[in-house]
Image (spheres, grey):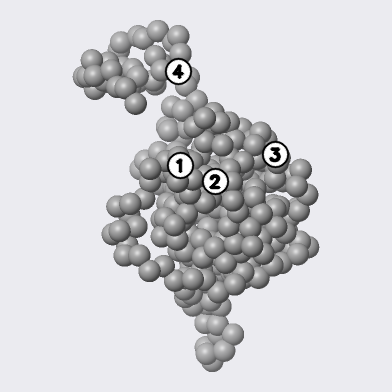
């Protein structure tokens, strides 16, 4: 990649000056000004999700309700999309990850070149467990006799209040060993997936959902595309508008885990926010309001003739 050093120096030398009007010929010109334009939707989001002393005063009763009644947090964390009638496929016990953590972190790269081969059900099990599976439980309600205590499961990534409003859907683009093409939903508490659709035409739509240029990444070469959705209300019930930020942050925690796990088992992965929202929501069968796609990650076999 050729970098124009003069242009780079010019951009880095810019100073924040909200009084300077800049032309709005393109997003580039608009946002290199480092100041929000009046009425900009990003500014409205930023301002309305700030934690201030005033908003904290409003937030207190809602957050306090969850603190005072742990059953609310338990119930919120257990809520799942309405897929109870879908077939449940148990995932096999996970393989351990032998690589040292520092090695996995240092060698992690976004690798866009994939071979078009599938991965096995065993591989998918290992990825999902280490990315977003249940890693432990804690007692949130005691009966007093040591029996039938209410246990809340915790997962492999941070979630504000342990509410887990982010859901993982897996589109198997290329068939692998014991892993047919189709659309699946991951159930962490069961370490299983629900079969949402095995119509090949459904997963073929992933190609239209991802908007990235095909010479940068071809999603049809991935083994699976993992779509993360946010059930925003589950976080906002406790944290108000700031809960929206927490959902986005949580999706990043999960995506990073998935990339590190993929790297540890020798698979390529690349996180993608470049998808058409309405098409992605339609593919996953979510309404785009109460639950909506927020992130996607392509995972597949390495194409050794592509990325280094």
Task: Indicate which disc, 3 or 1, sits on the residue closer to the N terminus.
Answer: 3
User: Label 4 belongs to which residue?
Assistant: 27
Task: Indicate which disc, 4 or 3, sits on the residue closer to the N terminus.
Answer: 4
Q: Residue at x 52, y 30 (%)?
A: 215
Circles 4, 2 touching at the beta carbon (< 8 Å):
no
Classed neighbour count for the residue bearing mark 3: other residues with Cα under 10 Å, few (<14), some (14–19), many (≥20): some
Q: Residue at x 35, y 9 (%)?
A: 21
Task: Note whether 52 is above or below 9 in the view shown.
Answer: below
Q: 42 or 302: nearer the eye?
A: 302
Q: Could you say where residue 121 lies in the image, as x and y percent from the top left?
A: 61, 64
Classed neighbour count for the residue bearing mark 2: other residues with Cα under 10 Å, few (<14), some (14–19), many (≥20): some
**Quadrant hosting residue 90:** bottom right
User: Label 2 belongs to which residue?
Assistant: 115
State how far apart marks 2 and 3 are (Cα): 19 Å
Q: Residue at x 52, y 71 (%)?
A: 94
* Disc on res. 205: 3
State how far apart marks 1 and 4 are (Cα): 34 Å
Element under label 2?
Answer: loop
Closer to us: mark 4 or mark 3?
3
State how far apart marks 4 and 2 are (Cα): 34 Å
Task: Note whether 151 is above or below 161 in the view shown.
Answer: below
State how far apart marks 4 and 3 are (Cα): 28 Å
Task: Indicate which disc, 2 or 3, sits on the residue closer to the N terminus.
Answer: 2
Task: Note whether 189 is above or below 103 in the view shown.
Answer: below
From the viewer's perspective, tell me whether residue 222 is left or right of residue 68: right
Task: Indicate which disc, 1 or 4, sits on the residue closer to the N terminus.
Answer: 4
């Amino acid at each position: 990649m050729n970098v124009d050093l003069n242009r780079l120096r010019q951009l880095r030398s810019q100073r924040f000056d909200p009084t300077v009007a800049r032309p709005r010929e393109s997003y580039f010109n608009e946002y290199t000004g480092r100041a929000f334009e009046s009425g900009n939707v990003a500014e409205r989001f930023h301002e309305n999700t700030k934690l201030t002393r005033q908003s904290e005063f409003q937030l207190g009763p809602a957050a306090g309700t969850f603190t005072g009644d742990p059953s609310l947090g338990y119930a919120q964390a257990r809520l799942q999309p309405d897929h109870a009638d879908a077939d449940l496929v148990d995932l096999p016990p996970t393989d351990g990850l032998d690589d040292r953590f520092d090695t996995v972190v240092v060698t992690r790269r976004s690798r866009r070149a994939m071979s078009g081969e599938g991965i096995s059900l065993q591989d998918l099990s290992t990825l999902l467990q280490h990315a977003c599976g249940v890693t432990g439980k804690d007692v949130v309600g005691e009966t007093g006799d040591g029996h039938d205590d209410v246990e809340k499961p915790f997962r492999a990534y941070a979630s504000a209040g342990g509410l887990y409003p982010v859901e993982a859907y897996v589109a198997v683009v290329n068939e692998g060993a014991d892993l047919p093409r189709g659309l699946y939903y991951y159930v962490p508490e069961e370490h299983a997936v629900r079969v949402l659709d095995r119509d090949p035409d459904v997963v073929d739509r992933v190609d239209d959902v991802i908007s990235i240029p095909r010479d940068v990444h071809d999603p049809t070469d991935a083994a699976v595309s993992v779509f993360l959705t946010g059930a925003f209300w589950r976080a906002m019930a406790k944290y108000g508008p700031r809960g929206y930020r927490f959902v986005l942050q949580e999706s990043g925690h999960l995506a990073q885990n998935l990339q590190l796990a993929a790297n540890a088992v020798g698979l390529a992965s690349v996180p993608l926010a470049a998808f058409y929202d309405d098409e992605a929501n339609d593919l996953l069968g979510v309404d785009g309001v109460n639950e909506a796609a927020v992130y996607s990650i392509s995972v597949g076999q390495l194409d050794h003739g592509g990325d280094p």
